[in-house]
């Protein structure tokens, strides 16, 4: 704690002198006032942590100063000094929110006890407020798992029941459904919340490195092991270890992992001494582990050990009721990250989102909204701003497809003079059109003319002009 600043206020010089000596002896910084108004002023401008104020001073007495300070929300611990302790004054001082009172003449020991209590109180206050800050931060960043659909509420219920227990949890769900977020939520609601949350992704770590990633290695364990290194188990001590994509765990390591979970101790690579471990395991996968077991890619005994409790996160397409809330959450979040106006979704956008299948689940929603919020000039996001993959597909009309193919061709020809582009290109449009229809009618020109909606004679003329081999279309 930094140096403590104390205001002393009394019109009696000798009292000020004694107090100053005592306080500086306790390594406190002293500011002095000898009347009410200057005490009031210093309380405001200097914001001392503690104030010792005489009840009788010129201008305004200690009680008036105390009252004004409390009304202004001043946080100083105020100690009132009285020459004679009348019950009335004492009561009044305490009612007004004094930290304590002391009767003159007092001995220094008595004052010191009060001061120590005031300092201890300051410390507690500081700790509580920093805890509150940290808690607020935590709530704001890590643990916002959004959803009010029945499926998600059921997940919350299960999590509420099991978060505090040390049981191993297996989280199942498609990619992007929030498995890691849920694991963090469980961790921060468990008795291990103050401990670390460590994740390791079996799909991202090369097979050969997995063991040393998990358990660490001793110096000299293999070429290149110049220094010993801690593994994830050690890093997660007294916290939570999140085994992400556990379905990709190399099969030979699975037996080792199972043993560590059961025995609660492990060996570093190249280590001779076993190390005790106290971690809570949460595993996740988007694979069908039962199938992996039957295909001998995953050990059945490990699966049994992992799924003490299984929580399944449903795909977003099965809980579209969460779309509005999630969208609002992400739009707000990006507003905080990137600034700018808060954007909203047009009703057509909401409809488009409801019709979309969301193969990438919540992560895809987050990405699509991030891009739209960043790139759209409008504050009301349209389906075009969202540019969902499916509607991208639908939007591509015949005209767009043909334009796309024509464009490079026309760009190549440039804009130099007479080239008779129209007459050159039209046959390339007409020929496939007529040929495809004739193919469908197996060369029957009467039918083809009808399908095309042109005169039979016109069709015959075109066939000749475009040099379409009608015989080849008959089978
Ligand atoms: N219910 C939710 N509320 C808020 N954000 C969510 C929610 N679900 C997922 N997210 C966000 O979506 C993104 C993907 O979530 P997460 O990484 O937890 O998914 P995952 O299931 O682990 O995906 P993968 O299998 O691809 O690793 C993260 O940015 C996460 O914060
Ligand atoms: Mg993940």
Image: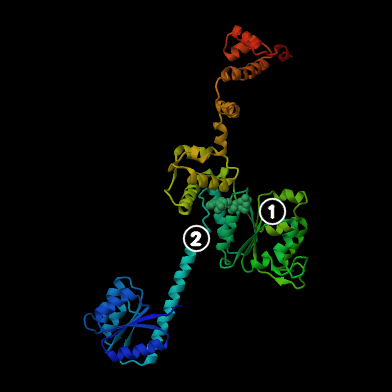
Label 1: which secondary element: loop
Number of the front mark, 2 or 1? 1
How many marks the image carries: the answer is 2
Residue plotted at (35% across, 88% down)? 20
Percent position (x, y) of residue 418?
A: 56, 19
Label 2: which secondary element: helix
Residue plotted at (38% across, 87% down)? 23
Q: Could you tell whether 336 is left or right of 474 in the image? A: left
Percent position (x, y) of residue 106?
A: 33, 92
Say which residue label 2 marks: 139
Residue plotted at (77% across, 48% down)? 295
Q: Can residue 351 be seen in this view?
A: no
Residue 14, which numbered label? none
Please tell me which residue lies in front, 346 or 188.
346
Percent position (x, y) of residue 84?
A: 27, 89
- Distance Cα–Cα, label 2 vs label 1: 29 Å
| Residue at the far front in the pictured view | 417
Of labels 2 and 1, earlier in sequence is 2
Residue 203, which numbered label? 1
Percent position (x, y) of residue 9?
A: 29, 83
């Amino acid at each position: 704690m930094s140096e403590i600043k104390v205001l002393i206020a009394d019109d009696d010089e000798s009292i000020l002198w004694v107090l100053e000596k005592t306080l500086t002896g306790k390594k406190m910084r002293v500011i002095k006032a000898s009347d009410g108004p200057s005490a009031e002023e210093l309380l405001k401008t200097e914001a001392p942590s503690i104030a010792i104020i005489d009840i009788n001073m010129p201008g305004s007495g200690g009680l008036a100063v105390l009252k004004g300070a409390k009304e202004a929300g001043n946080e100083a611990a105020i100690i009132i000094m009285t020459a004679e302790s009348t019950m009335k004054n004492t009561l009044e001082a305490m009612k007004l929110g004094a930290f304590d009172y002391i009767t003159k003449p007092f001995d220094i020991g008595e004052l010191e006890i009060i001061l120590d209590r005031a300092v201890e109180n300051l410390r507690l206050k500081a700790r509580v407020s920093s805890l509150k800050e940290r808690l607020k931060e935590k709530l704001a960043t890590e643990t916002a798992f959004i959803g009010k659909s029945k499926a998600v509420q059921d997940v919350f219920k299960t999590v509420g029941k099991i978060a505090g227990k040390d049981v191993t949890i297996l989280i199942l769900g498609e990619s992007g459904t929030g498995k890691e977020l849920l694991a963090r939520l469980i961790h921060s609601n468990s008795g291990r919340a103050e401990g670390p949350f460590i994740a390791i992704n079996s799909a991202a770590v090369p097979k050969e490195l997995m063991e040393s990633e998990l358990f660490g290695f001793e110096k000299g364990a293999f070429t290149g092991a110049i220094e010993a290194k801690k593994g994830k188990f050690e890093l997660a001590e007294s916290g939570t270890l999140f085994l992400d994509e556990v379905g990709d765990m190399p099969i030979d390591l699975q037996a080792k992992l199972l043993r560590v979970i059961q025995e609660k101790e492990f060996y570093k690579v190249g280590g001779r001494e076993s190390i005790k471990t106290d971690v809570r395991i949460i595993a996740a996968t988007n694979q069908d582990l039962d199938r992996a077991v039957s295909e001998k890619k995953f050990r059945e005994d490990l699966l049994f050990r992992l799924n003490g409790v299984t929580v399944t996160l449903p795909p977003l397409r099965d809980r579209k009721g969460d779309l509005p809330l999630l969208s609002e959450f992400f739009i707000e979040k990006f507003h905080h990250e990137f600034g700018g106006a808060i954007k909203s979704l047009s009703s057509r956008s909401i409809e488009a989102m409801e019709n979309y299948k969301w193969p990438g689940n919540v992560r895809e929603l987050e990405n699509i909204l991030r891009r739209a919020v960043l790139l759209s000039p409008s504050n009301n996001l349209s389906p075009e701003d969202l540019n969902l993959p499916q509607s991208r597909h639908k939007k591509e009309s015949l005209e767009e497809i043909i334009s796309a193919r024509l464009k490079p061709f026309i760009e190549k020809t440039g804009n130099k003079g007479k080239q008779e582009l129209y007459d050159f290109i039209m046959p390339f449009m007409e020929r496939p059109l007529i040929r495809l229809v004739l193919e469908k009618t197996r060369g029957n020109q009467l039918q083809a003319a009808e399908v095309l909606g042109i005169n039979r004679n016109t069709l015959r003329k075109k066939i000749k002009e475009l040099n379409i081999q009608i015989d080849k279309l008959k089978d």
